[in-house]
Amino acid sequence: MLVLVTLAIDRLGGQQLKEECDRLKTKPLDQTYQEVMIEVKRSNDEIKQLTKSQKGLKRSNVHMRKSQDLLQKKLSKVRKSNGILQINHKKIKTSAAILQDDHAHMSKEMEKMKTLQEDTVPWNVRGKQLKGINEHFIQFGMLDTCYRSYYLVL
């Protein structure tokens, strides 16, 4: 490439410019040129480091975007699960209320059963006695008295 540039300078500038370029090619660099060359080398090294850093940042950015997408999907699943859990919680609360009502009802029924078991006259016998007593009192017009006396006994 340097050869092409030299030929172009020769054609455009003539012999005098070519000689000047040849002289500058072989001339030793003074301190200023050396400092410029050192600075150019440092700049090249810095450009390489920045290029590596940029590639690393691009990879990190891609990784971060993938992570963000994954987190968004997981967040969506968590929100969906949360909705399902809230619905199930409401169902469980409703079931618990129903169970409490059933328990209260059954407790009352158990108390009734306990009372019936403690009674000395079984219910089927009591029913027959009351039927007979009711008929007797109906004959004599004293049904109200029968019920009053029955409740006084209990």
Image (tube, rainbow, N blue to C red):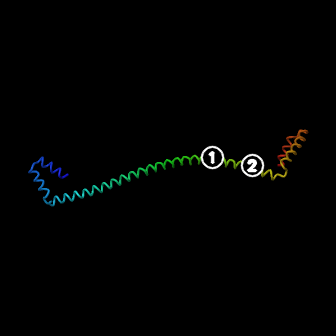
Name the residue tied to disc 1: 94
**Residue 134: horizontal and vertical position, in percent?**
87, 41
Q: Which mark is drawn over residue 113?
A: none
Foreground: 134 or 102? 102
**Residue 5: horizontal and vertical position, in percent?**
17, 50
Real-space Cα distance between discs 1 and 2? Answer: 23 Å
Foreground: 21 or 60? 21
Asked if residue 33 lies left or right of residue 89, the reply is left
**Residue 91: horizontal and vertical position, in percent?**
61, 46
Helix, strand or loop at mark 2: helix
Taking the spot 16% from the left edge, 58% from the top edge, the residue there is 33
Taking the spot 29% from the left edge, 56% from the top edge, the residue there is 48
Q: Amino acid at mark 1?
A: Thr
- Report the mark closest to the observer, 1 or 2: 1
**Residue 17: horizontal and vertical position, in percent?**
10, 51
Residue 44 in which image quadrant? bottom left
The reply to whether dot 1 and dot 2 touch (C-beta < 8 Å) is no
Q: Residues within 10 Å of mark 1 (few under 14, many from 20)?
A: few
Taking the spot 66% from the left edge, 47% from the top edge, the residue there is 98
Work out whether mark 1 precedes mark 2 in sequence or the reverse, and give the earlier one.
1
Name the residue tied to disc 2: 109
